Image (spheres, coloured by chain):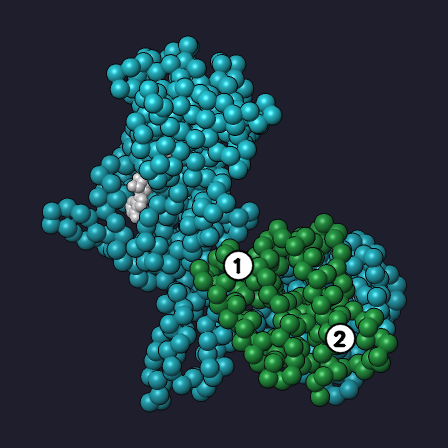
């Protein structure tokens, strides 16, 4: 049956040329006009209407609307569809929507395929209707082919333990621990050092509002201590982890005399192991010369000195700051360390508070006091700080002159590149953050490390604290440079994310993992060797050694499949049958040569 | 395969298959759409979880069945699964190139580059350059029985 009233035209073809192997329903979305203005959606519908496995195809104004969702459910039920293809926007937007539709209609959600004919078709080919339409037909055919080769899959369900391990008790880890306890979860907070607090415990007044770092940590220690649900273990490190998502057994070694080991069962692990400060090489901007200090050293000096600053017994009259030391280096740490501009500007205001007559020169490449922190920058200028920009290729040089005086030579871009000598009492190298050395923990938890050496999240915008290791979350500066309030915010995000799984008591894992065809496998061990998640084991099956996959540990990257000489490994959802039939579908549906003329 | 005569071979836009990844390169390719950039409609994309899982045989299959070029839009350093994803993906590309060379298909028909989740413009540029190179080479189908 074919009807042609816009925008919901449908064609139902049932069992015309023999019984179709599969019973697939296809929806081609107008997306208001976002798609149909550039792609002839009716032509797409008509092109696939006769395909052997297509039982029903229609165009729809908005596939995601409630009305269409209900129509889909009715259609799936009445036509006994065993596959669903929705050709609309990017899978990033509505996969959960249509998986839920499938579920409600009694269709296995993994028998549904999303086809992206908006971001990857209509919007990029708005200049070529024939080309866009031909391509859309190919993409929809590929989606139908993939669905035809799909198998029903069930999410892997696991019961979870309502407790969490927090590794590292800096400001991020401590705040995460109190947050988790307040959700009603049991918490084990372990810290390598003898005391809780991390770097913030060392600081006096901090930006943005001058609150004292040490006192903030004191308060957090009290909040940790008054919560019965939190067990604190100091001088402690994680040494072993076993079990699977939702139920990890962790061994914590306490460096007491003699060392002891404690075992806890936890549902999630929050890694909040923090950062280290960049340590300049001797000679880098004069580091090693008396009177040249890092920002962290300077901060401790300022915080410990209630009145005017002194070095080597002499009062400090001039301070010169050199920014971006160890950050934004083309062949070193390329990233911006984020906290340092504001921390330096804030420290210079504190210096001026203590002694209004100190001259302060800030030699910078760029100043990034973003958001409200801009007000601090303005205040420091009001208080007499002088800012001078040097060119990227001519950094300042620090030396002691013949008379033994400390001198910084810089090139001032704002006065036509004039070289300026600044006699100074103290040089502060504004050093950034670097990843903390934590090799054992990184390999134990299989934490993904990015190019800059910090831990990587799954998605910077949408899943900022989850890692690909289910139930292992990252918070604070172990993920990248952050100031203390950004660290706390990410700690609380890890709390919410832990709560979202652990409070339900059960968790669902995506079943798109690899599968070993044990008839083909001859056990060479290559797959086991290349899997960093330990998801592959060797078993003996009918007297033969073969590989087997632990679906709870497999992350579904498929990386092992490329190493299998026997093509015995396939990734569910991207099997060779699916990919090759998609390629066929694309070519079959794709533009004829004459439509591809330039 | 649709036959093409000499004249249309010069003019036809090369068919390119792109392999992208769910979390990194596909969002970058989507972004080209959100920004309404343009590339050839003879470019189509298949998305997989991680570029290290692309099978060299799939690449060869695509070239043998009518695509003129295959572009691997790999995860690069940002891969959330594998720290050595770059090397692994390069290995996939190299093996696919060996495989097709044996079948008389030029290795230049397989290209690889990291495409990040905001690399929309870089992606479009790659497609333009690759289309130009493939245009020079002519359709693959002509050389393969
Ligand atoms: C000089 C300087 C000035 C600053 N000034 C400001 C400011 O004014 N305002 C502001 O907001 N921010 C400021 N910051 C930034 C602030 O210090 C950080 O944002 C904050 O310390 C990050 O907290 P964290 O919990 O992520 O890491 P950390 O403070 O580094 O804490 C991590 C904790 O984890 C522990 N740990 C590490 N590895 C392990 C392991 N394997 N097992 C167990 N425990 C482990 C460490 O011992 C540590 O206690 C400044 C930073 C510096 C360097």
Residue B126 picture quarter? bottom right
Q: Secondary structure at mark 1?
A: helix
Looking at the image, which is closer to me, A75 or A469? A469
Looking at the image, which is closer to me, B15 or A234? B15
**Which quadrant is home to the N terminus of chain B?**
bottom right
| Residue shown at the point (52%, 22%) measured from the top left | A387
Residue at mark 1 to residue at mark 2: CA–CA distance? 30 Å
Residue wearing tag 1: B76
Tag on residue B138? 2
Query: Is residue A471 in view from this perspective?
Result: no
| Residue shown at the point (70%, 85%) measured from the top left | B144
Of all chains in the rendering, the one displayed in green is B
Chain of the residue under label 1: B
Quadrant of ligand 1 in image: top left
Name the front one of labels 1 and 2: 2
| Left or right, A280 with reference to B132 | left
Chain of the residue under label 2: B
């Amino acid at each position: 049956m074919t009807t042609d009233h816009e925008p919901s035209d449908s064609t139902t073809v049932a069992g015309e040329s023999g019984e179709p192997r599969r019973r697939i329903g296809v929806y081609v979305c107008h997306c208001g006009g976002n798609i149909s203005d550039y792609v002839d959606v009716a032509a797409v519908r008509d092109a696939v209407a006769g395909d052997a496995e297509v039982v029903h195809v229609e165009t729809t104004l908005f596939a995601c609307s409630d009305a269409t969702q209900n129509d889909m459910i009715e259609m799936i039920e009445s036509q006994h569809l065993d596959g669903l293809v929705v050709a609309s926007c990017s899978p990033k937007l509505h996969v959960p929507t249509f998986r839920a539709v499938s579920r409600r209609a009694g269709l296995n959600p993994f028998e549904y395929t999303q086809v992206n004919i908006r971001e990857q078709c209509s919007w990029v080919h708005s200049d070529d209707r024939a080309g866009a339409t031909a391509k859309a037909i190919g993409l929809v055919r590929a989606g139908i082919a993939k669905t035809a080769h799909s198998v029903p899959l069930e999410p892997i369900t696991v019961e979870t333990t309502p407790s969490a391990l927090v590794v590292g008790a800096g400001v991020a880890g401590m705040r995460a621990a109190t947050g988790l306890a307040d959700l009603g979860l049991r918490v084990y907070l372990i810290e390598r050092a003898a005391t809780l607090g991390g770097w913030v415990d060392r600081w006096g007044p901090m930006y943005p509002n001058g609150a004292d770092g040490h006192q903030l940590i004191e308060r957090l220690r009290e909040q940790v201590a008054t919560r019965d649900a939190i067990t604190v273990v100091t001088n402690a490190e994680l040494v072993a982890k076993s079990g699977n998502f939702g139920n990890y057994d962790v061994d914590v070694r306490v460096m007491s005399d003699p060392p002891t080991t404690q075992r806890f069962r936890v549902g999630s692990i929050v890694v909040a192991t923090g950062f280290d400060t960049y340590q300049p090489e001797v000679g880098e901007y004069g580091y090693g010369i008396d009177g040249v200090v890092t920002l962290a050293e300077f901060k401790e000096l300022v915080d410990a000195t209630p009145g005017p600053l002194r070095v080597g017994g002499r009062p400090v009259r001039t301070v010169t700051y050199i920014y971006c030391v160890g950050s934004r280096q083309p062949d070193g740490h390329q990233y911006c360390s984020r906290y340092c501009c504001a921390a330096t500007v804030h420290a210079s205001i504190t210096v001026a508070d203590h002694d209004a007559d100190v001259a302060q020169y800030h030699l910078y490449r760029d100043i990034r006091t973003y958001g409200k922190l801009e007000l601090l920058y303005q205040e420091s200028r009001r208080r007499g700080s002088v800012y001078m920009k040097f060119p990227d290729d001519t950094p300042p040089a620090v030396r002691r002159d013949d008379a033994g005086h400390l001198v910084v030579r810089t090139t001032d871009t704002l006065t036509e590149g004039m070289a300026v000598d600044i006699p100074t009492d103290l040089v502060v190298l504004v050093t950034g953050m670097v990843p903390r050395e934590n090799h054992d923990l990184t390999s134990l938890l299989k934490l993904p490390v990015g190019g800059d050496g910090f831990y990587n999240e799954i998605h910077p915008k949408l899943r900022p604290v989850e890692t690909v290791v289910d139930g292992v979350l990252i918070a604070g500066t172990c993920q990248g440079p952050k100031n203390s309030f950004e660290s706390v915010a990410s700690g609380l995000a890890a709390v919410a994310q832990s709560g979202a799984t652990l409070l339900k008591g059960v968790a669902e894992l995506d079943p798109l993992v690899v599968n070993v065809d044990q008839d083909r496998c001859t056990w060479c061990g290559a797959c086991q060797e290349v899997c960093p998640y330990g998801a592959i084991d060797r078993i003996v099956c009918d007297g033969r050694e073969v590989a087997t996959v632990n679906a709870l540990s497999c992350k579904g990257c498929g990386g092992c499949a490329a190493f299998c000489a026997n093509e015995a490994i396939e990734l569910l959802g991207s099997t060779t049958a699916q990919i090759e039939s998609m390629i066929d579908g694309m070519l079959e549906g794709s533009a004829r040569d004459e439509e591809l003329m330039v | 395969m649709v036959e093409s005569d000499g004249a249309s071979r010069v003019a036809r836009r090369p068919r390119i298959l792109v392999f992208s990844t769910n979390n990194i390169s596909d969002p970058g390719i989507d972004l080209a759409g959100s920004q309404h950039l343009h590339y050839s409609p003879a470019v189509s994309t298949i998305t997989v979880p991680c570029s290290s899982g692309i099978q060299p045989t799939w690449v060869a299959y695509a070239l043998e069945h009518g695509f003129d070029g295959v572009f691997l839009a790999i995860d690069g350093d940002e891969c959330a699964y594998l720290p050595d994803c770059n090397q692994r993906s390069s290995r996939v590309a190299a093996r696919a190139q060996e495989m097709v060379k044996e079948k008389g298909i030029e290795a230049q028909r397989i290209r690889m580059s990291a495409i990040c989740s905001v690399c929309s413009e870089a992606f479009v540029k790659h497609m333009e350059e690759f289309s130009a190179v493939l245009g020079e080479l002519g359709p693959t189908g002509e050389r393969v029985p």
